Image (cartoon, rainbow, N blue to C red):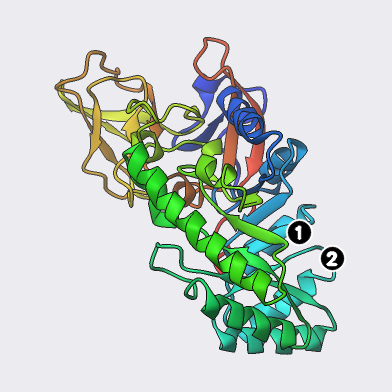
Amino acid sequence: MKPSADIGQPFAQVDTPALIVDLDAFEANLKTMAGMIDGGAAKLRGHSKTHKSPIIARKQMDLGAVGVCCQKVSEAEIMVKGGIDNVLVSNQIAGASKLDRLADLNRRAYVPFCVDHPDGVAQASTAAVRAGVTLDALVEIDVGAGRCGIAPGQAAVDLAKIINDADGLRFAGLQAYHGSAQHVRAYTDRHGQAQLAVDHARTTIQALDAAGLACDIVGGAGTGTFQTEAASGIYNELQAGSYIFMDADYARNHGEDGGAFGRFQHALFVVAAVMSYPSPERAVVDAGHKACAIDSGPPEPFGMPGAKATRLSDEHSVLELSEANDRPNWGDKVLLIPGHCDPTVNLHDHYICVRGLHTPDAHVEDIWPVAARGALT
């Protein structure tokens, strides 16, 4: 599908709805993260499930990231095709066809993956032998999220031994990601949950060391907690993803001082147009469920204090303006901050990359494909 803008076009002429990247804020976020972890033992492995773009992955690696991670083999395939040669599938892989594809990828790039069950080890071993490759496998431990992962400690050691005894596999480390901790609002509570993850990882590493098993990779962390894991002396890879865009949900987190989270800027928006004005207190824009994910709440109008996006339907969002100081006119463009950036990105074919977004000279500088959109296998 043709993008909704052309390079060089004024932002005011971008058709709606469209997925907008504020290049100035985006680049600042990249540099902020790189600066915050510079000099530490933990390196960034940015999570590409957020952006689904080899172009963005390369920009992260140019600033020091060791590679990227993703959740699906199909995402890894697109990253490798786009020139990214170090891609961790930070997830379990079930199914012979998927594991055959993973094994094939390892002929061209370094693509380790995660396991948490002996049956997954056996199936991966069969695929590796069939392809004539050695696959690096990380044991995922449950560090408190209650989702995937084997129990920390001896259970993880036992699984690591099974990996090393399997043909075509090598134990490469631990996946220790606490997803649900990322959106705990109070800093002390969020830090506390992340510290428990660190403790589980430390205990497991000590047990592995006693068994003669070394961890090349100890990965986890996210945008909400990465400073805790980075300072732990345990983690050497940080899997933050959303920091590049900063959605409305992450912005609800509190910083150390109890105030706004504040480290990163909003860099991702859906631009919509006011296409109906039924009353002075209610405007309707042309972006709904099909343009903005709402699993973390509705999008938030940017730069319109008091305005609220409500009653989303397939192609519409109602803006409640009764408490808004400034109200748009019919036909005006409105920037919406997605509640959750990852699934919102997956709804669009292209990023419209705008320079000087909040200035009179705003213009389209580039257009990037959302290359891994719909990559679910």
Query: Which mark is on residue 80?
Result: 1
Query: In terms of secondary structure, where does tag 2 sit?
Result: loop
**Nearest to the observer: residue 9 or residue 195:** 195
**Nearest to the observer: residue 283 or residue 41:** 41
Query: In terms of secondary structure, where does tag 1 sit?
Result: helix
Would residue 216 be visible to someone looking at this image?
yes
Q: Position of residue 256 (x, y in %)?
A: 39, 30
The quadrant where residue 98 appears = bottom right
Q: Position of residue 255 (x, y in %)?
A: 39, 31
Query: Which mark is on residue 108?
Result: 2
- In this rendering, would 365 be left or right of 293? right
32 shown above or below 294: above
287 shown above or below 346: above
Type of amino acid at the residue the image marks with label 2 = Arg
- Local packing at callout 1 (Cα closer than 10 Å; few below 14, some 14-19, many 20+) is many
Using the numbered discs, state the Cα–Cα distance from disc 1 to disc 2 in whole angstroms: 8 Å
Type of amino acid at the residue the image marks with label 1 = Val
Of label 1 and label 2, which has the lower sequence position? 1
